[in-house]
Amino acid sequence: MMKCLIKKLNQSQGASLMLALLVFLICAMCGSVVLAAGTAAAGRVAGLKKSDQALYTLTSAAGAVGEELKTAQYSYIQDGETIKENTLTPENTIITVTMKSMCDMIADGKTTATAAATITATGSDLLSDSVSVQFTMDGNYNITAVFSSDTLDSTVTLTASGVPYIYSDSNTDPKRPVIHTWGDIEIVSGEMK
């Protein structure tokens, strides 16, 4: 077969020219397919840095809120049906105002409280805006926070379990100091929008 092909290419008639052009055309098509595949792969790799950095930014924001939740404490005195002296410590953190308003709603008897907050990311050249957080708190002070941004294609979710502590041994004590803290903090990342 190979000898026949070489013999045909060495002939001086027009059929050998056609065969040479056919071989050249097949080689050119294979080369263009390889170039197209390489270009597409390069485009995907270039986009990976941006998507990974965006996911790290959201995860970092969730981690910062999680660290604050580890030390946060909501306390109040329940005097019969009245809630008073309600405070959230530490004060002046990223989530203080948001958490305090949600905790107050739950302490006042609501079964669910929601709030939104914005966290400004610093040191990120990929974010032109801030990270948005949608907080939800249920009647047991369990928290779910979903972190997202308009410029990013993924979300990160943080969950934390409410841990109540009542100072009084008796439920009939008219003035019961109550403290809520948060534990079992979990961050789930990588959900695409």
Image: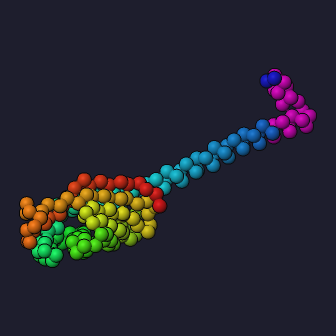
Residue at position x 55%, y 48% from top? 41
Tell me residue 163's x, y (percent): 20, 59
- The quadrant of the image that shows the N terminus is top right
Tell me residue 10's x, y (percent): 85, 29
**Is 126 situated left or right of 160 in this image?**
right
- Between 138 and 68, which is closer to the camera in this rendering? 138
**Is 185 situated left or right of 80 in this image?**
right
**Is 59 situated left or right of 164 in this image?**
right
Residue 7: quadrant of the picture: top right
- Between 70 and 31, which is closer to the camera in this rendering? 70
Residue 154: quadrant of the picture: bottom left
Residue at position x 72%, y 39% from top? 27
Q: Across the whole image, how many numbered discs are drawn on residues?
A: 0
* Camera sees residue 42: yes
Tell me residue 150's x, y (percent): 44, 69
First to last magenta residue range: 3-21
* Camera sees residue 10: no
Residue at position x 81%, y 37% from top? 20
Residue positioned most to the right: 13
- Between 50 and 131, which is closer to the camera in this rendering? 131
Q: Check if residue 75 falls in the magenta segment.
A: no
